[in-house]
């Protein structure tokens, strides 16, 4: 489209320039010719009064010298039998004759001025009546250089102006084409990005009205796609909350049944059911499209989600005699993560605490808000993880020790969707600490020494979520 506009503008402007420049150039040439012959007529008119008075050669030569140049003017007096000089010229003729005798005789006969072509230019033949009643002819030579004087310069100026108009019109057409083509290109790029799964892709509403309407329609469609996928993720998260969490409680209760065939069968059935639920959740999770960035509306308040999920898990913690605490969740902390994804990650980590630590083991959740990242720490006072790298490898599905690694994989995918990461280390409680680094600006998290790297932490008052009473850890 851009080059089409440039070509159309080039063709139209070129036609306009040719339509005006060619006639104007011809007019300039005619004006130069008229100017040259007007000067010749003035020179001839300066001699006419003298001829009407006298035909004396000496006087006429002085008049010719004062009116013009001897080389460019000649006076032809009609022959009346006067003798000629040695060159054959009549004694009364003055100057060099360039026109033919036939042309001079024709002017005398017609009695009006005439022009004729000669070598190197043209001559103006002007008849003048003498006192004797005869007709003399004044011949003024007009060289070709005088006829075309200034024409080449004028044509060069016209050509330069025409070229400038063409270049200017092409530049304007190119800018207009860019104004129309660039929004179209961005619309195409946005469609490709959306097709590749980058749901955060949006198109700026700019350009002509038609492209603005197309951009608005595209953004509305993308928002609808994001909403549909968010609903799908919400459904998968609900599946995780409704099935895995009660299964954890059921497994803990089954562990307290003691020994016996019925208790073993119950525990075996719970384990089988848990494996099936993990398979269903993994299938639903793998079916979700991976996005390069969270789309509009995918952000959430991390502090609110932490308080909500800790309110849920605190009930089970009281049943098992676990002490717990929450820090840093007393003020809003916005992160570019869907609410359901963050809730699923917290449930996965807290479920691991209840599953892999003994009853009565304390745990904590800390939320740290930095300038470019938010850190969520889930720590416990258990025995710890001997090999964190192997645990993360299981989170990528490479484990074969009976642990599916599903929880760590959910957490890792959530953090990496923002450019962050997940680290496993030792907590201040003596057990395991899982650090979730959520990048706020979408850049890849740099290598850091420990989880205190570049994040500035504010001291947050400790509080319990879901309950109105503080608890301390030993």
Image (tube, rainbow, N blue to C red):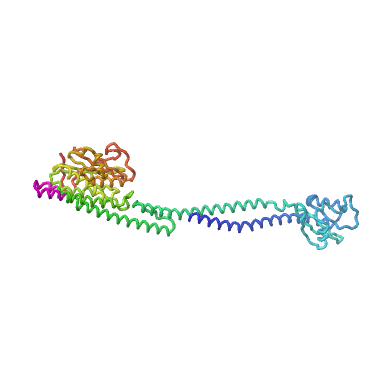
Q: Is residue 466 something that shows in the picture?
A: no
Instruction: Name the image quarter holding residue 207.
Output: bottom left
- Left or right: residue 471 versus residue 183 is left
Give the percent coordinates (x, y) of residue 174. 50, 53
Give the percent coordinates (x, y) of residue 67. 78, 52
- Left or right: residue 151 versus residue 130 is left
Establish if 125 lies above or below 462: below
Looking at the image, which is closer to me, 125 or 261?
261
Looking at the image, which is closer to me, 412 or 251?
251
Asked if residue 411 is among those painted magenta in the image, a careful observer would answer: no
Report how many numbered discs are placed on residues in the image: 0
Give the percent coordinates (x, y) of residue 185. 43, 53
Q: Is residue 152 something that shows in the picture?
A: yes
Establish if 400 lies above or below 175: above
Picture quarter with the C terminus: top left
Give the dominant element type of the magenta stretch: helix, strand or loop: helix
Give the percent coordinates (x, y) of residue 173. 51, 55
Looking at the image, which is closer to me, 226 or 21?
226
Q: Residue furthest bottom?
A: 110
- Left or right: residue 3 versus residue 82 is left
Magenta-drawn segment: 252-270
Looking at the image, which is closer to me, 260 or 335?
260
Asked if residue 255 is among those painted magenta in the image, a careful observer would answer: yes
Establish if 207 lies above or below 432: below
- Left or right: residue 327 versus residue 47 is left
């Amino acid at each position: 489209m851009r080059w089409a506009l440039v070509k159309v503008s080039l063709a139209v402007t070129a036609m306009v320039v040719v339509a005006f420049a060619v006639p104007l150039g011809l007019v300039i040439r005619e004006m130069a010719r008229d100017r040259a012959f007007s000067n010749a007529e003035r020179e001839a008119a300066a001699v006419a009064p003298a001829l009407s008075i006298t035909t004396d050669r000496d006087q006429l030569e002085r008049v010719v010298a004062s009116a013009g140049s001897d080389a460019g003017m000649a006076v032809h007096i009609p022959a009346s039998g006067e003798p000629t000089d040695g060159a054959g010229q009549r004694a009364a003729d003055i100057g060099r004759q360039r026109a033919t005798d036939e042309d001079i005789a024709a002017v005398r006969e017609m009695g009006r001025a005439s022009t004729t072509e000669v070598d190197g230019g043209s001559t103006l033949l002007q008849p003048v009546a003498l006192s004797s009643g005869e007709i003399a002819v004044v011949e003024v030579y007009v060289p070709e250089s005088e006829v075309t004087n200034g024409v080449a310069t004028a044509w060069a100026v016209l050509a330069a102006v025409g070229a400038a108009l063409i270049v200017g019109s092409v530049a304007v057409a190119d800018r207009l084409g860019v104004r129309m083509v660039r929004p179209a290109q961005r619309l195409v790029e946005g469609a490709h990005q959306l097709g590749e799964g980058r749901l955060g892709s949006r198109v700026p509403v700019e350009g002509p009205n038609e492209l603005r309407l197309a951009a608005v329609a595209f953004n509305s469609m993308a928002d609808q796609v994001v909403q549909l996928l968010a609903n799908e993720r919400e459904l998968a998260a609900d599946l995780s909350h409704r099935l895995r969490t009660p299964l954890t409680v059921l497994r803990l209760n089954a562990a307290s049944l003691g020994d016996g065939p019925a208790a073993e069968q119950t525990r075996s059935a719970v384990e089988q059911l848990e494996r099936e639920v993990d398979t269903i959740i993994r299938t639903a999770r793998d079916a979700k499209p991976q996005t390069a960035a969270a789309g509009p509306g995918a952000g959430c308040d991390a502090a609110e989600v932490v308080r909500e999920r800790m309110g849920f898990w605190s009930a089970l913690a009281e049943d098992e005699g676990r002490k717990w605490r929450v820090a840093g969740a007393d003020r809003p902390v916005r992160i570019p993560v869907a609410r359901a994804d963050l809730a699923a990650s917290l449930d996965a980590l807290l479920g691991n605490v209840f599953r892999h630590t003994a009853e009565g083991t304390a745990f904590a959740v800390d939320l740290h808000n930095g300038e470019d990242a938010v850190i969520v720490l889930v720590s416990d006072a258990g025995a710890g993880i001997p090999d964190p790298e192997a645990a993360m490898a299981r989170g990528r599905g490479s484990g074969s020790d009976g642990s599916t690694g599903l929880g760590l994989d959910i957490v890792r995918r959530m953090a990496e969707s923002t450019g962050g990461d997940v680290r496993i280390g030792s907590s201040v409680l003596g057990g395991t600490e899982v650090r979730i680094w959520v990048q706020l600006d979408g850049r890849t998290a740099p290598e850091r020494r420990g989880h205190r790297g570049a994040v500035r932490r504010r001291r947050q008052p400790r509080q319990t979520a879901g309950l109105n009473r503080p608890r301390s850890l030993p």
